[in-house]
Image (cartoon, helix red, strand yellow):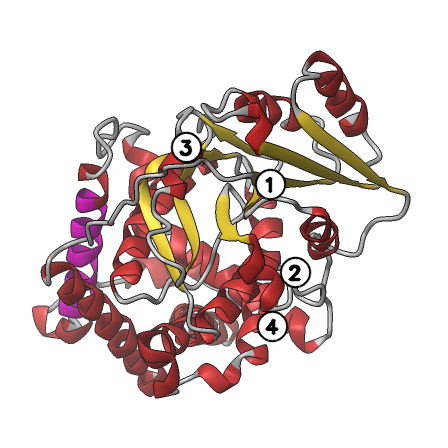
Amino acid sequence: MNIIFWITYFVSLYFMVFWFIVFLDGGTPRLKKKALKVLPLVTIAIPVWNEEKTIGETLKSLLSLDYPRDKLEILIVNDASTDKTKEIIEAIMKKNPGYDIKLINNKEGGKGKAYPMNQMLELAKGEFFVNLDADSKLIDTKTLKKLLDKFTDDNVGAVLPCMKVWSPQSFWEKVQHYEFLMYMFYKRLMGKLDCVHVCPGPFSVYRTAVVRKIGGFDTKNMTEDMELTFRLQKFGYRIVQTLNPVVYTKLPNTFKGIRKQRNRWFKGTVLTLLKHKDMCLNKKYGDFGMVMYPMVALSCIIAVAMILTTAYYWIKPNVLFFYDMYFVGFDFRTFIKHMTFNFSIYDLELGTIITGIVILSISLLFIIKALQHFSDERLLAKGTIPFAFFLFFYFLILAIIWLEVSFELVRGKIQKW
């Protein structure tokens, strides 16, 4: 177990230092812009399944975009929702006859998000294809224009907005708020090496012809956005991650919701890695193959190894304690009476402590730098307790979910949506 423990620490420290060096080498990259002489036709694709709580706000924010109506095509596939999603969409369509909005109602659903995405890709007339999740919200009316002007040449296959949590109120939403801030900053650093590994659902903009050329969305993968990103990388297209504009997304507000969502994300990650295993450590795919692929793969392994070693070092002494107590008839009073505390500084694992301090320091630096890129954000704006939990305990929670995912994959348990 000691070997696994130190390998886990070493790999974690290696990648933390690697991205720290990337950051020091000029910080986050400045993105080029291309003035749009003629605004192109854009198709916005929204897959929905039981989204009555969010689809109304999402569509209203979309219709407020500063973009000519005759240049927008809005496609919505209702994948056999059983709530009032369909009625809410139809009411908004009726109130906004000036927009080109098409609603396709699937009689049978449950095949996964990639199916409705491919339906809309086939129907799309726009030069650009935008994926918009039904639980996302646009605040900046110039969001679309700001993303389109990052398509500086034909080699740019996708441009991604910054994602933030939509109105975090609960403890778990606030924790994820800090997670997303750090993740977005981290993705900008990935963009510096042209190795972004996922184009998320909230308003990622693609070239329609490129997505069709590489085969559309994979219907056998539950994280079709990540799998498509791997293929964009495989075919040599650039993916640009911005920190402005910002698109807001609704995240689970309970631990149960987080567990369900991350379970699906993590399974999709494993399926994507297995499908594209030929990219791993392959110089043909540049930094994506030599750095990003192995890092994503190792993060899965490290998470499981970390939770297993933590459990081992916590459970072993307690098992031995109760084993000893069994032979004295669980006489806790005698044990407490003779309890002594013999502490020495030499008992401390200095190597572990120093490694932990380095990782924690770099994490704090990344969080502070991420906050500096958002003028409306302060370090403890969402509370001291959510921030402390994110810093010290949240990744342990994610590691436990990774362990659960590992067992379910072995058993062949894979969901769709």
How far apart marks 2 and 1 lie (CA) works out to 23 Å
First in residue order: circle 1 vs circle 3: 1
Instruction: Say whether residue 348 is left or right of residue 139.
Output: left
Q: Which kind of residue does numbered mark 4 sit on?
A: Leu
Q: Which residue is mark 2?
A: 222
Q: Quadrant of residue 169?
A: top left
Q: Which mark is residue 143?
A: 3
Between 262 and 315, the one lying in front of the other is 262
Instruction: Please rate how many residues cluster around mark 3, counting C-alpha atoms within 10 Å: few if below 14, some from 14 to 19, many from 20.
Output: many
Q: Nearer the viewer, mark 4 or mark 3?
A: 3
SS at circle 2: loop
First in residue order: circle 2 vs circle 1: 1
Q: Is residue 355 magenta?
A: yes
SS at circle 1: strand
Q: Which kind of residue does numbered mark 1 sit on?
A: Thr
Q: Which mark is residue 271?
A: 4
First in residue order: circle 2 vs circle 4: 2
Instruction: Please rate how many residues cluster around mark 2, counting C-alpha atoms within 10 Å: few if below 14, some from 14 to 19, many from 20.
Output: many
SS at circle 3: helix
Q: Residue at x 68, y 51 (%)?
A: 117
* Residue 179: image location, x then y, percent: 37, 46
How far apart marks 4 and 3 lie (CA) works out to 32 Å
Q: Which residue is mark 1?
A: 43
* Residue 37: image location, x then y, percent: 36, 37
Span highlighted in magenta in the image: 353-369
**2 and 4 marks in contact (CB < 8 Å):** yes
Q: Is residue 136 above or below residue 239?
A: above
Q: Is residue 360 above or below residue 100?
A: below
**1 and 3 marks in contact (CB < 8 Å):** no
Q: Is residue 88 above or below residue 115?
A: above
